[in-house]
Image (cartoon, rainbow, N blue to C red):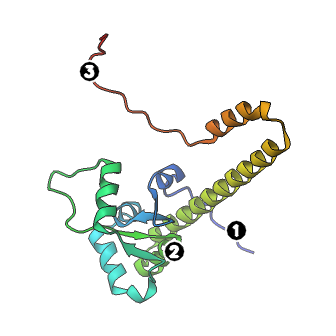
Amino acid sequence: MPKKKTTALVVPPQLIENRIYFIRGQNVLLDEDLAELYEVPTKALNQAFKRNLDHFPHDFAFQLGREEWIFLRSQTVTSRSWGGRRYPPYVFTEQGVAMLSSVLDSKRAVLVNIEIMRTFVRLRGFLVSHGELAQKLAALEKAYDVQFRVVFDAIRELMKPASKSKQRIGFKSDV
């Protein structure tokens, strides 16, 4: 039996995780982020996608609506000196990303997709374990006296995702 080659990570998992958005109830990646990961122009990725639309049902890929696009732009705070995109981006679900590797037909696309699939699996595992923890906490709260409510509220507060606090720029007023 021949030995399998061990390959170094093509893309760090953290880089992929930071590019996954939750839109319309699904985890998705933007076309421009995928193009960057695959090291192809966004235009080339979208052309390959459009040439093979029959491979991408609506639950694999879709174009953002104008309102979604505006909201996303306000969240990511990116701008380009030439004015940015003219049209809302396409987004790809986990299944759509898997389909892209066959459409793009490059070794890098396959290697990047392997890392993306692993990231999606880790993300699902985290969400499942977080949900189980919340259920166990609710069961404990029902089982114990009201006097422990403060403890349970504190635990719930700790379970919430950390919000990024924005520091104000300028001088602090003593008024």
On the image, the x and y values in percent for residue 102 come to 47, 80
* Mark 2 Cα-neighbour bin, 10 Å: few <14, some 14–19, many ≥20: some
Q: CA distance from mark 2 to mark 3?
A: 47 Å
On the image, the x and y values in percent for residue 5 come to 62, 65
* In the image: residue 145, left or right of residue 133: right
Q: Report the residue at 48% width, 75% height from top.
A: 96
Residue at mark 1: 3
On the image, the x and y values in percent for residue 121 come to 62, 62
Q: Secondary structure at mark 1?
A: loop
Which one is closest to the eye, mark 2 or mark 3? Answer: 3
Q: Mark 1 or mark 2, which is nearer the start of the sequence?
A: 1
Q: Mark 3 or mark 2, which is nearer the start of the sequence?
A: 2
169 or 38, nearer to the observer: 169
Question: Which amino acid, mark 3?
Answer: Gly
On the image, the x and y values in percent for residue 38 come to 40, 65
State the quadrant of the N terminus. Answer: bottom right
Q: Report the residue at 50% width, 58% height from top.
A: 10
Considering only vertical position in the picture, is 39 above or below 100? above
Q: Secondary structure at mark 3?
A: loop
Q: CA distance from mark 1 to mark 3?
A: 60 Å
Q: Quadrant of residue 125?
A: bottom right
* Mark 1 Cα-neighbour bin, 10 Å: few <14, some 14–19, many ≥20: few
Considering only vertical position in the picture, is 137 above or below 152? below
Q: Mark 3 or mark 1, which is nearer the start of the sequence?
A: 1
Which one is closest to the eye, mark 1 or mark 3? Answer: 3
Residue at mark 3: 170
Residue at mark 2: 98
